[in-house]
Amino acid sequence: MRVLWLALSICLLFSSVARAALIDKQLQEAEDYLVIDPSRSYELLQNIKEPTSWTTYQFIRWHLIAMRSAVPTDRQDILISSLEAIFEHHQHAYFREKLTSITSGLGIWLRKNHYTTDALTSFECSYKYAINDRQRLTLTNSLALLARQLDKLDQAKVLYRKAHGMAVQSERINILAMIENNMGLIALEEGDLVSSEKHVRSALTHFQNIDKRVGQISAGINLLFIFLTQDQLVNFERLYQPTENLTQSFTNRSKRAQLTWLRYVFLLKQGGTLNPAMKKQLHTAFTMISDERMQRLFKHHFADPFFITVPKVNSPDIRQFKRPWFRLVSECAWK
């Protein structure tokens, strides 16, 4: 009987080890897709079964990958639900190891949902525990994005210039491309179309060189916008189809909505007209553009000149984040 019990225990142990190894392999595959196709990453996560058998490390890692896939695909529901789950294990060693990534992801969610003061708190805590220049560079970019959202464009430009120098020195092409893209948006808001085009073209080239599809979509749409504002219709036609192909295979509703606007504005600039169904589609698409600053740009450059009725763009109220676990971020006193 003792021999049988020992044999059974060994079988169970090997089975448990094999199952854990399989889960680790599946998690690695999902993580590997984050750069080229983050929506695929989340699909792969759904295939990992039996969460009750996961270790705490695997549970945290699953949600970290879900968070990282949610940011480029603009899945705010996934981002906040994974944050809620992860903070239940804030005392775990792997949570501490990934603290900067976790609080940085939280800062992104807070910024996009207009908890701007709390977003600053979260980014500053992230910066405090950053362990390398790559993380500090990414966070400098995030702080610049937040400054732009708060309409502090001069502060945002100072931060972007700092981040740009850091990215060039460290040869972080991905971050450099993001910075160029964001600097292009600031130039667009300030009416400097020449500088805007220069920055966004550079961003698109960098994203293409590293085959980062989400970046190609963002920079491609921004460059299409700039082409239309300057009536560069031939350039628009050349870039539109590859950008549309990438965008339609992606799950970001906001990007698809922007592309819908660009397609119909191109039609209008060619002398076409909009029927009632098209106007209704544009009205709906406008509400799906998740960034109110982008909504203002579309309204100013395209909706108003072509007398297209869109909803009023309101400045969102500043909110206060009140989840109980946010106290840990506010205190920012992890050892």
Image: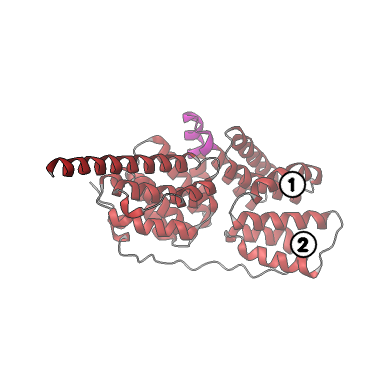
| Main SS, magenta residues | helix
Q: Which element is circle 1 on?
A: helix
Q: Residue at x 49, y 51 (%)?
A: 71
> Of the residues shown, which amino acid type is indicated by label 1?
Phe
Q: Crowding at label 1, few (<14), some or many (≥20) Cα neighbours within 10 Å?
A: many
Return the x and y of residue 289 as percentages of the image width and height: 61, 60
Return the x and y of residue 16 as percentages of the image width and height: 29, 44
Any part of residue 277 in sight: yes
Return the x and y of residue 274 as percentages of the image width and height: 81, 64
Range shown magenta: 163-176
Nearest to the observer: residue 111 or residue 68: 68
Q: Crowding at label 2, few (<14), some or many (≥20) Cα neighbours within 10 Å?
A: few
Q: Which element is circle 2 on?
A: loop
Nearest to the observer: residue 12 or residue 191: 12
Seen in the picture, residue 157 relative to 107 is either above or below; the reply is: above
- Where on the picture, by quarter, is residue 18? top left
Distance Cα–Cα, label 1 vs label 2? 16 Å
The residue that mark 2 highlights is 305
- Where on the picture, by quarter, is residue 323? bottom left
In the image, residue 234 lies in the stretch drawn in magenta: no
Q: Residue at x 51, y 57 (%)?
A: 75
Quadrant of the image containing the N terminus = top left
Q: Residue furthest right?
A: 271
In the image, residue 169 lies in the stretch drawn in magenta: yes
Any part of residue 190 in sight: no
The residue that mark 1 highlights is 227
Mark positioned earlier in the residue sequence (1 or 2): 1
